Image: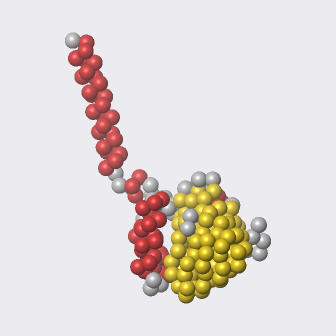
Amino acid sequence: MRATLRLAALTLCLFSFGTEMAVAQSQPVAAQRRDTFSPDEIIKAGHQFFGSVSRGLALVVERAFSRWGEPNGYILGQEGGGAFVVGLRYGDGSLYTRNAGDRRVFWEGPSIGFDAGGEGARTMMLIYNLPATDAIYQRFVGIDGSAYFVGGFGMTALTANNIIVVPIRSGVGFRLGANIGYLKFTPKATWNPF
């Protein structure tokens, strides 16, 4: 008799736990996290920013979303850079967040590797796990690879303190190679990449 009561109590507990899990899983991700951006919102912002190069952008954004999910911020801006073994990159843009407003940001950074050429790029950066807008002001390290002549899209990933920054670049110029480096984000423009 006791075994039957225990089995009934255990079944009731598991049933109530299971229904709570089913309700939590049935809610869409967007309803659970209102501070993130959907793929459609990012692609729309990218279309407006990059212009007619929509197919390449959609493929790169889809790849980023499948790997890291929905970002809670993004940057739209432009940058320029060049390299011959050692390189530099400078850029500026605006950081957009759902619940903390917009903010002007600048970035610069050195790189070293098997890399040569120069480019100008319109850049969209997807930002994941950004706890506060001021947390963007630090160095993000990563490996970059470029292979385009005249134009094309490229995507890399940089990380620092559990924050992931994914630059998506539509570059014009000639650049070929791979390098390791970092981007340092600042609230004001500076020439010092270190």
At 47% from the left edge and 65% from the top edge, which residue is drawn? 64
Image spot of residue 138 (x, y percent)? 69, 61
Above or below, comparing residue 21 to residue 48 in the picture: above
Q: Which image quarter: residue 174?
A: bottom right
Q: Residue at x 63, y 78 (%)?
A: 79
The spot of residue 91 in percent (x, y) is 66, 76
- Horizontal arrangement in the rendering, residue 145 relative to residue 83 (left or right): left
Can you say which quadrant of the picture contains the N terminus? top left
What residue do we see at 51% from left, 61% from top?
72
Query: On the rendered image, what quadrant is the C terminus found in?
Result: bottom right
In the rendered image, residue 117, in percent from the top left (x then y), is placed at 65, 82
| Quarter of the view holding residue 114 | bottom right
From the viewer's perspective, tell me whether residue 109 is left or right of residue 145.
Answer: right
Front position in the image: 151 or 161: 151
Residue 193 appears in the picture as rendered: yes
Residue pictured at 72% horizontal, 74% vertical:
86
| Residue found farthest to the front | 114
Q: x and y percent of residue 18 in the render?
A: 30, 37
In the rendered image, which quarter is residue 184 located in? bottom right
Residue 78 appears left or right of 85:
left
